[in-house]
Image: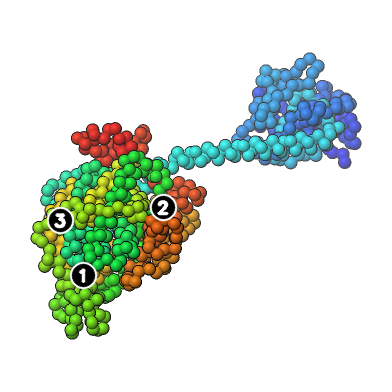
């Protein structure tokens, strides 16, 4: 089909001759005339689109050029070059508008040799590069003679037509190479596509590697800022002052009344010290009320163990504030050690003992605790704890701590429910003080929130005293002082548990305890050592260390300090090993470690002074010398203690799950790991606990979960190994730690998703050295630890 012809020159026009070999008239197109001599590439591309160059012109040779205004016949096209010598075509890419082209091609110029074609140079992007020295020659040639091209269909925008069109602007035009091989074009296209795919894949891999590296480098700083924002201040003071309808800020001022190194004066120090220990009293004194009766101890033994725990807590807290992590954290008998102690106390060899049963069990516990403490000291002071820190993240810590509280669900309300007339009012009063009255402030202090446990216990204890004095628990012909095995009447046997758990005068500790008694090491006799119990306490010491790691990190943010370094953490764990060793020497029945409830106490009291804790610890040591104080605490009814523990264990579960705030809690990865860990930590021990004890002695229902060590399903040639494995797999917190540790470190997840803990690096140039001063050992002591780099800052 003939096409229209158009001839444009600089003032003259002439008819165009027919194209050689063409089937019609060859159209005339205007020559390229730029606005200046440097040939703007945008104008080149615009001219190429108007003239309609064929896509194959880039590879098929040069266009014919008419050196005069007269028509001349086109010479036959030259043969195409070999396929191996041709440059592979670039993949199609969209051509931007001339006025919006963000990356114009380099200037195009021509060089002419004598009688030779113009020389082309193409850069790596497929753009034309013509030496600028020939710019004037090209402009003169384009102005002197019009360019004559054969009519071709117009190339759509966005293909290779842009570069092919630009390639037609090389000074002289020659006939199109109509004899190009189709097979050669296809081979070039295939090779180009493979090369482009390989190049794109390589670039994508390099970009992904750079992205991951940058993400790893930036994550620490981002998480540190995120943690500070989340932990800034949980109080509602700023939110209360916000205007109606205005959202409270996410981050608020800390509102600490007393900083870590601050000395507010002796009067306030005494007040803050007593306040801090009273707010955590439930964890300090209620463990013996559960453990000692289970071990066969008397009321006097319970009072003695309480006094010993007060002494050990005071000593170890003082040591920790001087030589440990130096954070304002109370050390005491942890619930982490309670379940293993109950497992050992219910071993088969101790069930049928009638004489000195309590002392035999306590000596066995002492030996196991001493071995576990040595293992914890090695873990801390050798620097192995720094390696373990790489595996411990909030996704591991959250279900592990939560399992500590969930492990005692079979004891809590079954014991409290035996006397609902005092247990239910106590639980309701605790919830009332901690939830509904928490914002009421008297004398500048939120007394209902801070003193919820001592206030509630005092009120309900007085109420129980009036019930006892009024005869609410008097049954005709029955006496609470007669052992259950000697009660002959069935009616009295039914009321025996009620009288023993509800009456306030059932304990004879106050009548028999000495006024002054100083606890001393090995007061129960020399410890006994067995492999099967020692291995249990060694594993439990690792669990206690994981619990303390969470407390260190959370406490540092609450008191506005930088997170502790690896050396500070190792030093704190090592000193907790020493604390547990002291507990084993004095015979508390459990290890001494950082109490998880410290986090709640720091958040409610806003008191972070180390000196206040040291002064409060001194009061504990003094109180431990008065036997009547331990006897008074031992006289608390069992139902009352069980009600307080229901609240305390629930608080531990909540504190454990609150560590998920560091992670992407809505991530399906984290939800599955935490949910599965919590479920399996309850289900696996239930499987081991279903095996009935082989002893003829009938155990109470709340002690059956701790009797699986001697009768579990694991049966090998070694009795000691059977005992240790059955015992460990029947302890909820051990199962939770193992499962969470494996899943979190094998399931892929980003640092942000996992909430990886940030431990301060003192070598970082961005770290302010002054921010680590509260962690430094006292100068008179640090000189002795200069050789121990793994426990320094």
Task: Say which residue label 1 marks.
Answer: 637
Q: CA distance from mark 3 to mark 1?
A: 21 Å
Position above or below: 745 against 50: below
Residue in the picture at 31% in, 38% down: 791
Q: Whole-percent x and y of residue 242?
A: 31, 56
Task: Say which residue label 2 marks.
Answer: 396
Label 3: state its secondary structure: helix
In the figure, residue 426 lies in which quadrant?
bottom left
Lateral position of residue 514 relative to residue 298, left or right:
left
Give the label on residue 624, or none: 3
Looking at the rendering, in which quadrant would you find the N terminus? Answer: top right
Label 2: state its secondary structure: helix
Residue in the picture at 58% in, 39% down: 205
Looking at the rendering, in which quadrant would you find the C terminus? Answer: top left
Q: Are marks 3 and 1 in contact (CB under 8 Å)?
A: no
Q: Are marks 1 and 2 in contact (CB under 8 Å)?
A: no
Q: Whole-percent x and y of residue 776?
A: 26, 38
Pointer 3 or 1: first along the chain: 3
Position above or below: 61 against 157: above
Lateral position of residue 668 relative to residue 424, left or right:
right
Q: In this view of the protein, which residue sits in the foreground, 185 or 371?
A: 371
Pointer 1 or 2: first along the chain: 2
> Which residue is situated farthest in the left direction here?
515
Q: In this view of the protein, which residue sits in the foreground, 510 or 262?
A: 510
């Amino acid at each position: 089909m003939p096409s229209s012809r158009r001839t444009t020159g600089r003032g003259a026009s002439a008819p165009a001759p027919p194209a050689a070999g063409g089937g019609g008239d060859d159209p005339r197109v205007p020559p390229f005339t730029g606005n200046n001599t440097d040939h703007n590439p945008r104008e080149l591309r615009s001219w190429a689109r108007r003239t309609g160059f064929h896509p194959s012109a880039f590879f098929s040779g040069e266009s014919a050029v008419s050196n005069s205004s007269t028509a001349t016949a086109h010479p036959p096209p030259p043969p195409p070059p070999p396929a191996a010598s041709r440059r592979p075509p670039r993949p199609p890419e969209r051509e931007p508008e001339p006025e919006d082209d963000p990356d114009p091609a380099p200037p195009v110029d021509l060089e002419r040799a004598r009688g030779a074609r113009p020389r082309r140079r193409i850069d790596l992007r497929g753009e034309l590069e013509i030496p600028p020295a020939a710019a004037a020659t090209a402009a003169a040639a384009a102005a002197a003679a019009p360019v004559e091209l054969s009519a071709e269909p117009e190339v759509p925008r966005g293909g290779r037509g842009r570069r092919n069109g630009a390639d037609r602007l090389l000074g002289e035009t020659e006939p199109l190479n109509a004899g190009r091989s189709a097979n050669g074009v296809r081979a070039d296209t295939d090779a180009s596509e493979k090369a482009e795919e390989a190049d794109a894949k390589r670039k994508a891999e390099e970009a992904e590697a750079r992205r991951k590296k940058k993400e790893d480098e930036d994550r620490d700083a981002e998480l540190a800022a995120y943690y500070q924002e989340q932990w800034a201040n949980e109080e509602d003071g700023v939110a209360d002052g916000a205007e109606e309808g205005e959202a409270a800020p996410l981050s608020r001022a800390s509102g600490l009344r007393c900083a870590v190194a601050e000395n507010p004066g002796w009067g306030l120090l005494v007040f803050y010290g007593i306040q801090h220990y009273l707010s955590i009293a439930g964890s300090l004194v209620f463990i013996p009320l559960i453990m000692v009766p289970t071990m066969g101890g008397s009321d006097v033994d319970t009072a003695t163990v309480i006094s010993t725990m007060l002494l050990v807590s005071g000593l170890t807290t003082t040591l920790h504030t001087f030589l440990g992590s130096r954070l304002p954290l109370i050390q005491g008998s942890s619930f982490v050690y309670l379940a293993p102690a109950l497992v050992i106390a219910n071993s088969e060899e101790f069930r049928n003992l009638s004489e000195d049963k309590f002392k035999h069990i306590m000596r066995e516990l002492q030996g196991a605790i001493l071995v576990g403490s040595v293992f914890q000291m090695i873990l801390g002071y050798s620097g192995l704890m720094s390696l373990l820190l790489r595996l411990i993240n909030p996704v591991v810590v959250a279900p592990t701590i939560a399992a500590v509280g969930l492990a005692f669900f079979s004891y809590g309300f079954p014991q409290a429910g035996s006397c609902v007339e005092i247990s239910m009012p106590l639980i309701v009063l605790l919830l009332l003080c901690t939830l509904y009255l928490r914002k009421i402030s008297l004398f500048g202090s939120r007394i209902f929130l801070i003193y919820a446990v001592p206030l509630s216990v005092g009120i309900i204890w007085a109420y129980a005293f009036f019930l006892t004095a009024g005869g609410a628990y008097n049954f005709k012909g029955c006496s609470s002082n007669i052992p259950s095995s000697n009660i002959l009447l069935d009616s009295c046997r039914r009321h025996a548990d009620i009288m023993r758990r509800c009456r306030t005068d059932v304990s004879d500790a106050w009548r028999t305890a000495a006024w002054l008694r100083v606890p001393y090491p090995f007061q129960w006799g020399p410890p006994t050592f067995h492999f099967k119990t020692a291995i249990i306490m060694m594993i439990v010491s690792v669990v206690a260390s994981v619990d303390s790691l969470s407390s260190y990190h959370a406490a540092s943010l609450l008191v506005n300090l930088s997170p502790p370094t690896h050396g500070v953490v190792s030093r704190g764990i090592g000193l907790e090993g020493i604390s547990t060793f002291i507990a084993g020497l004095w015979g508390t029945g459990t290890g001494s470690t950082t109490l998880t409830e410290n986090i709640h106490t720091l958040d409610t009291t806003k008191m972070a002074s180390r000196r206040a804790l040291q002064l409060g610890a001194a009061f504990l040591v003094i109180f431990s010398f008065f036997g009547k104080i331990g006897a008074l605490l031992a006289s608390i009814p069992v139902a009352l203690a069980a009600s307080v523990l229901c609240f305390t264990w629930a608080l531990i579960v909540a504190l454990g799950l609150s560590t998920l705030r560091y992670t992407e809690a809505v991530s399906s990865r984290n939800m599955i790991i935490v949910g599965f860990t919590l479920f399996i930590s309850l289900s696996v021990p239930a499987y081991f606990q279903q095996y009935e004890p082989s002893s003829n002695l009938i155990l109470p229902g709340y002690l059956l979960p701790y009797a699986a060590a001697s009768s579990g399903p694991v049966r090998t040639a070694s009795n000691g190994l059977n005992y240790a494995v059955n015992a460990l797999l029947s302890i909820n917190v051990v199962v939770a730690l193992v499962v969470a540790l494996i899943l979190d470190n094998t399931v892929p997840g980003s640092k942000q998703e996992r909430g990886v803990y940030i431990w301060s690096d003192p070598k970082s140039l961005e770290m302010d050295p002054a921010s680590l001063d509260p962690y430094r050992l006292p100068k008179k002591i640090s000189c002795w630890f200069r050789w121990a780099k793994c426990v320094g800052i």
